[in-house]
Image (tube, helix red, strand yellow):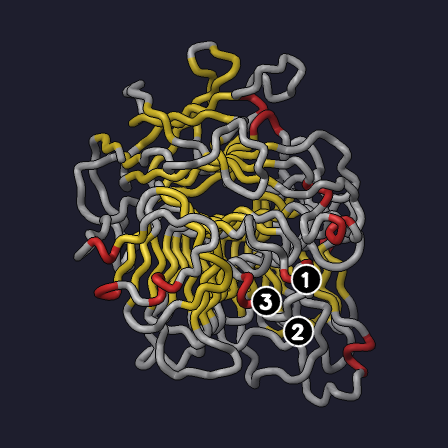
Amino acid sequence: MVRVGGSGTDPNDNNRYGAVPSDVGLVLYREVPGIPAATSTDVTRIKISDKYKVEVCLSGTNNWQKVTAYQTGSQATVNQDITDSTKLNKGYYGHLKNWTHTYVNFEVQYGVSVDVKITSLSNDPLDPLYSINPNSSKAHPNNSAYNIRRFNQDTKSIVLTFTDPKLFAVDINGQMDNHHTGKGYTGLPIHTISIFANPVLSKPSAPSTQNILKAMSDGFVGALMRVPVNGKLIFAPGIHYIGNGVELLRGNRDYYIPGDAIVYGTLKCGSYAQPDPNPNAITIFGYGTLSASRVTHPSYTTPPDSKIENYRPIDFVYSDNCHVNGITIVDAPQLSVSLQGEFKGASISIGNTVRWVKTLNWRENSDGIDPGDNTKIENCFLRCQDDTIPTMGGRGIDRVVLWNDANGKSFITNVNGPRRDLTISNCTVIYARGIFEAGGGQVFALNQDQKPTRRKNPPAKVTFNDITIEDRFPTKTVLYLKWTTAQDTDPSVTEDCSFVGTTFNRLTIANPMGQVQMEKLTLIGGGSRTQIRDFTFRTLKVGSDPNPVTSLGFFNISNDTTNLMLIP
């Protein structure tokens, strides 16, 4: 670990091992011991990046220090833009064959400005990534970094500057920004990169050597993880193979994955079949990686496994006082983080949190974070290939970056609506791509696989504040809430199941119409019991026009869409 001057703390951090006062501006990690070299062809394991090199320094100092850049990639072997390609690829989308994602993790204090240098490692003059053009390379979210420029006239390197901890992607040479990479894309594989500049965390000390889990080889059962001494377990630097569906015990237990450790496997606590009123009280934290890239998708095991909870990197049931903070989750074969728990009121439920978590996924069913009713999500970066975040419950969502390539909705709502009022703020959808012509893939959408049963009375409301959709080439229309007449006339629908009272404050959309689903913003009711009403758009901006939308020209509505308000 390397420390370089500076000061500052996270004013919003209240997690158990949060940011602490320090004279450190940057905290870097040594390379993970035993990590496969860049030349490795083993696609089931994370390796040193063979696409990019990353260096950082305090802004303006030119005291460059290398940050280890790790690389994950799709394991697809058949490149077909068809549904069956996932079967041939055991859950991997053939559309993403040979795609890679390079990522770096380091720590930075609030108030500190950092220069990042990204260098192409390509030695092929015919490779589009042989050199990097600062004019066609861009950081996302748009306001993440600034002053992208060449490094000393070196055509293979660019430098960018940012301030404060933040999670962002850098699109090199417009690979994503200048092309629609969803359905119909036949271009070269895409090689993306993300900068994960995390807030500084205090590092826990181990009470004894029994609290340190040494790097383990294949076949390790993972039983040692169940009972950490004094409630704390620290993964030593290196690579750990803990197994699939490792059961953690409840009750004030902390698991620390440092930036120089990679853990292969999945973790769970609790059973859906055996309700337990006791809180989990588990914290998983650190800036290391939890990878499921060596875990087969449950649909393609022999025989197929119906216990999908064992395939979620983190799956906690009946959870309260559980916290997932900082880790990078790679190649989930199912939902990346599931913290299911009932909100019993502020005086009873402590609540769960997911903060500074990153997901880099390639497979079908690789949803993002399900907050249940009792979880707050903040400062996350979610690249998923299925639905990213459900907006049916939880304690709120703030400052999240969302990215889809093959499938999935950014924000998905249940046909029965939210279970309680929910606020979602300061989120950016950088890419909303998909390979399917029908079905989901929109940014805001209804789960069409369900049928309405009943509505909360009075209906709970969802408020979106300061949401930006940056993607110039979304595959489908950005907003798609559409009831059908069949849903409205279904005999089982005996109550008013209308969507009521959703508010969008300051919604900015680069392009509202998809490249495949070329429809307007869609709000269509199905009948008297499945209306869409009392939707408010306050300061809706579309395209390059700086003025708010004041007419319904961008909308596709029906007679069962009522009281739609546009407020400049």
The residue identified by callout 3 is: 308
Between disc 3 and disc 1, the foreground one is 1
Location of the N terminus (image quadrant): top left
Look at 68% across and 88% down and name the residue there. 495
The residue identified by callout 2 is: 415
What kind of residue is marked 3? Ile
Location of the C terminus (image quadrant): bottom right
Look at 31% across and 80% down and name the residue there. 347
Crowd rating for badge 1 (residues with CA inside 10 Å; few <14, some 14–19, many 20+): few
Look at 59% across and 39% down and name the residue there. 43
Between disc 1 and disc 2, the foreground one is 1
Q: Where residue 141 is drawn, which disc sits there?
A: none
The residue identified by callout 1 is: 302
Nearer the observer, 8 or 89: 89
Q: What element carries label 2?
A: loop
Is 370 placed above or below 50 here?
A: below
What kind of residue is marked 1? Thr
Query: In the shown orientation, is residue 266 left or right of residue 105?
Result: right
What kind of residue is marked 2? Val
Residue 199: horizontal and vertical position, in percent? 31, 45
Query: In the shown orientation, is residue 60 left or right of residue 486?
Result: left
Q: How far apart are marks 3 and 1 (CA)?
A: 14 Å
Between disc 2 and disc 3, the foreground one is 3
Look at 66% across and 55% down and name the residue there. 364
Crowd rating for badge 2 (residues with CA inside 10 Å; few <14, some 14–19, many 20+): many
**Where, by quadrant of the figure, is residue 344 drawn?**
bottom left
Residue 171: horizontal and vertical position, in percent? 56, 32
Is 41 placed above or below 565 here?
A: above
Is 488 placed above or below 226 here?
A: below
